[in-house]
Image (cartoon, rainbow, N blue to C red):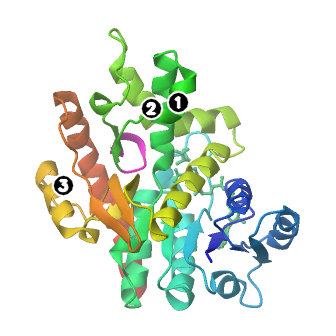
């Protein structure tokens, strides 16, 4: 039995993500929560002939608590998306409070759940969730994940386009490390499973992966940011977590995690980075308790070293911003 709760389930990401989750027979319960429209979304999904029992709740009458009751995995795509001209950090003012409230609900009702944070800015919202769980004495770093899968999905797609082999897109593996915004997104193209042809403009490809989100924001022209590709990526990550929890071995996925989740791996990564960061996105081996191993960066070239160096100050600031928000609230 696996129950997944989706918080923000009626939104642009929440609806297609819930649809994908409903199609997977590994999932036996779906608890959908939003401040609008979840009863309708749940009724609609509940007619699909798959095992998951779907329930939709709104804010009144303890809706958050009901959606979270018995949840093994909680996915959070609640919050506002960007409009053209905005950075992800511009979303902080609104989304920080939303994520804090949802994290308080998780601490109270599903303290042992695996928590997957999609809401932006991920580099700050994940530390917020960690601080809320810590304050309630239920923080387990192995169970908290910032969802950075979309960056890896984009890198695979763009590399497949460049090698003229779209059919290979799902088998192209490019590690993307750091965080989830602008220069904190660091693709390690030198480690691509599929070598790039000579003459490819690597700098342009790096930029495209770093600012892939902006491409979608611009094309949507005020109607939001990536939703469908994010639902695909979030689903892919959630299913990996569920399979690992169910005992499947050797599952590795990218995620923005607290480096104390694997102290040996975290220390090795800190050594490579040459600086202490509490959170970083790297390849993570997953197991029944969540994070098993945080993989190191491995061999990277000179320009990738520069990209990492450029990512660190922003990451530090973003993480501090998340922490600061909770500290200020408790003063
Ligand atoms: N991590 C990533 O790679 C990634 C990718 C795409 C989008 N995002 C982020 O995901 C978030 C959602 O994007 P979207 O396009 O689905 O936005 P959306 O506006 O379409 O949907 C957000 C949903 O959240 C709900 N919501 C708002 N406040 C809430 C609250 N207090 N409790 C519960 N639900 C609440 C809204 O009612 C809405 O249904 C944004 O912050 C966006 O930037 C992250
Ligand atoms: O770009 C955004 O604001 C949404 C998301 O983080 C993305 O990468 O598409």
At mark 3, the secondary structure is helix
Q: Is residue 255 visible?
A: yes
Q: Identify the mark nearer the N-term, 2 or 3.
A: 2
At mark 2, the secondary structure is loop
**Quadrant of the drawing holding the C terminus:** bottom left
Residue under label 3, please give it. Answer: 269
Q: Could you tell me residue 288's position as x and y percent? A: 41, 72
Dot in front, 3 or 1: 1
Q: Is residue 227 left or right of residue 318?
A: right
Q: Is residue 89 left or right of residue 11?
A: left
Q: Could you tell me residue 286's position as x and y percent? A: 38, 62
Residue under label 2, please give it. Answer: 172
How far apart are the two marked residues, 2 and 1, measured between alpha carbons? 5 Å
Please say if the residues under marks 3 and 1 sit with CB atoms less than 8 Å apart: no
Say which of 26 and 18 sits in front: 26
Q: Pointer 3: residues within 10 angstroms few (<14), some, or many (20+)?
A: many
How far apart are the two marked residues, 3 and 1, measured between alpha carbons? 28 Å
Residue under label 1, please give it. Answer: 169
Which residue is found at the position 57% from the left and 54% from the top?
A: 234
Tell how many labels.
3
Q: Pointer 1: residues within 10 angstroms few (<14), some, or many (20+)?
A: some
Q: Could you tell me residue 238's position as x and y percent? A: 54, 60
Q: Identify the mark nearer the N-term, 3 or 1.
A: 1
Please say if the residues under marks 2 and 1 sit with CB atoms less than 8 Å apart: yes
Which residue is found at the position 74% from the left and 57% from the top?
A: 19
Q: Pointer 2: residues within 10 angstroms few (<14), some, or many (20+)?
A: many
Instruction: Give, as a single range, the part of the protein colored magenta.
Output: 179-184
How far apart are the two marked residues, 2 and 3, measured between alpha carbons? 24 Å
């Amino acid at each position: 039995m696996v129950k997944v709760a989706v918080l923000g389930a009626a939104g642009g990401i929440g609806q297609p993500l819930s649809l994908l989750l409903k199609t997977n027979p590994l999932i036996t319960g779906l608890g959908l929560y939003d401040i609008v429209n979840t009863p309708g979304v749940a009724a609609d999904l509940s007619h699909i002939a798959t095992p998951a029992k779907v329930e939709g709740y709104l804010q009144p009458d303890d809706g958050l608590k009901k959606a979270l009751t018995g949840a093994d995995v909680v996915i959070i795509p609640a919050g506002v998306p960007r409009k053209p001209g905005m950075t992800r950090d511009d979303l902080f003012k609104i989304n920080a409070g939303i994520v804090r409230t949802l994290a308080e609900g998780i601490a109270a009702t599903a303290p042992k759940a695996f928590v997957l944070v999609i809401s932006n800015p991920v580099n700050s919202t994940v530390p917020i969730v960690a601080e809320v769980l810590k304050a309630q004495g239920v923080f387990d770093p192995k169970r908290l994940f910032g969802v950075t899968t979309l960056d890896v999905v984009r890198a695979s797609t763009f590399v497949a386009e460049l090698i003229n082999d779209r059919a290979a897109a799902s088998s192209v593996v490019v590690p993307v490390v750091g965080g989830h915004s602008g220069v904190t997104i660091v693709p390690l193209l030198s480690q691509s499973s599929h070598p790039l042809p000579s003459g490819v403009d690597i700098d342009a490809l790096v930029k495209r992966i770093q600012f892939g989100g902006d491409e979608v924001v611009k094309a949507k022209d005020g109607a939001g940011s990536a939703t469908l590709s994010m639902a695909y990526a979030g689903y892919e990550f959630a299913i990996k977590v569920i399979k690992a929890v169910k005992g499947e071995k050797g599952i590795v996925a990218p995620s923005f995690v607290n480096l104390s989740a694997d102290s040996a791996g975290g220390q090795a990564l800190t050594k490579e980075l040459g600086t202490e960061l509490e959170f970083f996105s790297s390849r993570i081996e997953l197991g029944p308790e969540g994070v098993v191993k945080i993989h190191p960066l491995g061999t990277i070239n000179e320009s990738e070293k520069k990209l990492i160096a450029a990512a660190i100050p922003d990451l530090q600031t973003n993480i501090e911003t998340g922490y600061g928000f909770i500290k200020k609230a408790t003063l």
